Image (cartoon, grey):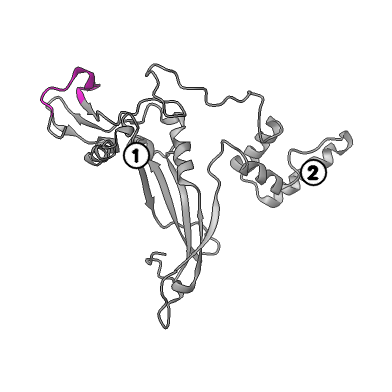
Amino acid sequence: MDGLPLEPEPSDFVDEGLYRNYHPKLTGRPCDQDGKFLDPATPPPPRTQASRHDWTPYAARIQFDTAKFLYQRTQMSQGNVDLLMDLWAASLLRFGGEPPFANVKHMHELIDSTPLGDAPWTTMEASYTGELPANPPSWMTAKYELCFRDPRVCARNMLANLDFAKEFDTTPYREYDGRMVRQYCNLLSGDWAWEQADLIAEDPDTHGAMVVPLVLGSDKTTVSVGTGDNEYYPLYISLGNVYNNVRRAHRNAVLVVAFLAIPKGEQSNHVI
C-alpha cells in the first residue's frame, strides 16, 4: 500500500495525463440515512420533501422574501425595521391586513427558527478555572464572552452544499504524472489523509465510509471600528474535502464557527 505503483490501473487514469490510486477501504460509497450502502448509480434523494408552497416557519413567501431583503440584502437597522413595520401596518389598517412582521423581534425569531438555515449562534461565558496565585493578573479573574455554533451542524451544511459537488474529494488518493512523479494539490492528495484513512480502516465497520477532515484556523480581526476597545479572534472551519480553489474563493466553504472578544491590554496569548 505504501510503495510507488509501477503500473497504475486504467481505472485510476484521470485527465491531463495524471494517474491516481484511491484508498481501497475508505471509498466514500453512497448510503442511505441508516448507513446502508446503495448502488453507485442510485440518484440522490430530493433535497426536501416539502411542497414548493411550504415556506415553514414563514406564513407565506412574502414574509420570507421580506426577511431576506431586510436582514440579508439591506441589513436594515432594528429601529428602521420597527418603523417600517409600523408604517406597513398603518397602510393596511383600513383593509384589515397586517404587515409581514409585528416588529424586528418577531422577524428575528422566525429567522432563528428557520430549519434549513445556518447553525444558530450560542453565547456562553468562559473563565480561568485553575488555582489562583496571591496576586492574580486580571485575565485570570475576568470572564470572557464566547460566541459559537455547533461545528457538526456547520460541517453538515457544507457537505449538503451542491456548489461543491464537482469540486469535492470523497476518497484519499495519491496522484502521479505521466513520469510517475507524485503530485500534491488538495488536502486529500497528501500523505496525512491517506495515513488517517489507514488508521480509521483498522475497524472493518468503517470500510466504505468517507473521511471528512475539518480544517480550523483563527486570526485577529477588527470587528468594531467605533469603540476600538476589543480585539476579536474568529475561529474558522472548512472541509478538507473541498478543492483548495473553492476554499480560497470562500463560496461558503469557510465559515466562522466561533469568536472570542478580548479587551485590549489583556494578555491575549494565554489559553482559557
The image position of residue 217, as x and y in percent, is 37, 50
Residue 209 bears which disc, if any? Answer: none
What residue appears at the point 36 percent right and 31 percent down from the top-left corner? Answer: 168
The image position of residue 129, as x and y in percent, is 44, 69
Residue 56's place in the image compared with 43, above or below, is below
Q: Is residue 186 visible?
A: no
Mark 2 packing: few (<14 Cα in 10 Å), some, or many (20+)? few
Q: Is residue 198 left or right of residue 55?
A: left
What residue would you read off at disc 2?
87
Residue 245's place in the image compared with 265, above or below, is above
The kind of residue tagged 1 is: Gly
**Foreground residue among 37 and 10:** 37
Start and end of the magenta stretch? 5-19
Q: Is residue 239 visible?
A: yes
Residue 67's place in the image compared with 4, above or below, is below
Q: Is residue 12 rendered magenta in the image? A: yes
What residue appears at the point 71 percent right and 33 percent down from the top-left corner? Answer: 59
What residue would you read off at disc 1?
240
